[in-house]
Image (cartoon, rainbow, N blue to C red):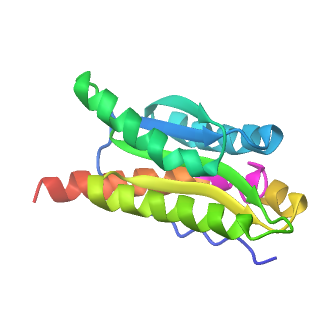
């Protein structure tokens, strides 16, 4: 397995007062607990408030984010960033490819169409052992990575809004 490479991001644009949305797929509860722990720790570290919405599986994540973004906007409390967390483990059928590709495509479409900073923390792995190595905060911490990605994009968005 390749070592994780995290470049230090130097952008310190102010993101105080930001609100993030985490949408998690609870298909694998124990793995999901680890992903969520990593993401929440990153948000707390920088003082970003968050809400968590739970859906059954990875395919439901993009739609749930879109629904929540609309509702938050209508209620005058828009989200500044979104984080998708889930796990898809390869099985014996083509279903793995459909779920991984379509959930990812849905997230990319959503991020671009809505211009919402979004971190994709949906694991797509061959085995449970690979999922655990990526989910645990003391190992690859992909939940934390997804939160950091969303926050990095939020900093870019806020910095460029001032230009």
| Region rendered in magenta | 135-144
Residue 43 visible in the shown view: yes
Farthest-out residue, left: 163
Where residue 34 appears, as percent x and y from the top left, is 75, 42
Image quadrant holding the N terminus, namely bottom right
Specify whether 156 is left or right of 109. left
Farthest-out residue, top: 75
Where residue 43 appears, as percent x and y from the top left, is 51, 38
Image quadrant holding the C terminus, namely bottom left
Residue 71 belongs to the span the image colors magenta: no
Vertically, is 141 above or below 100?
above
Specify whether 12 is left or right of 33. left
Instruction: Tell me which residue sits at (74%, 37%) in the image.
Output: 33
Where residue 134 appears, as percent x and y from the top left, is 75, 59
Instruction: Tell me which residue sits at (63%, 72%) in the image.
Output: 5
Where residue 108 appears, as percent x and y from the top left, is 42, 63
Q: Main secondary structure of the magenta part?
A: loop
Farthest-out residue, bottom: 2
Viewer-proximal residue, 7 or 118? 118
Vertically, is 54 above or below 2?
above
């Amino acid at each position: 397995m390749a070592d994780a490479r995290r470049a230090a991001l130097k952008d310190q644009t102010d993101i105080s007062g930001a609100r993030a949305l985490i949408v998690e797929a609870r298909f694998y509860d124990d793995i999901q607990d680890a992903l969520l722990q990593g993401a929440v720790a990153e948000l707390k570290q920088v003082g970003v408030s968050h809400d968590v919405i739970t859906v059954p599986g990875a395919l439901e994540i993009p739609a749930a984010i879109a629904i929540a973004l609309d509702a938050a906007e209508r209620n005058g409390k828009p989200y500044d960033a979104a984080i998708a967390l889930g796990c898809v483990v390869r099985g014996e059928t083509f279903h793995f490819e459909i779920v991984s590709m379509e959930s990812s495509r849905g997230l990319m479409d959503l991020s671009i169409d809505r211009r919402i900073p979004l971190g994709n923390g949906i694991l797509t792995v061959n085995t449970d052992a690979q999922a655990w190595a990526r989910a645990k905060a003391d190992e690859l911490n992909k939940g934390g990575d997804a939160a950091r990605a969303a926050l990095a994009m939020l900093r870019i968005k806020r910095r460029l809004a001032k230009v």
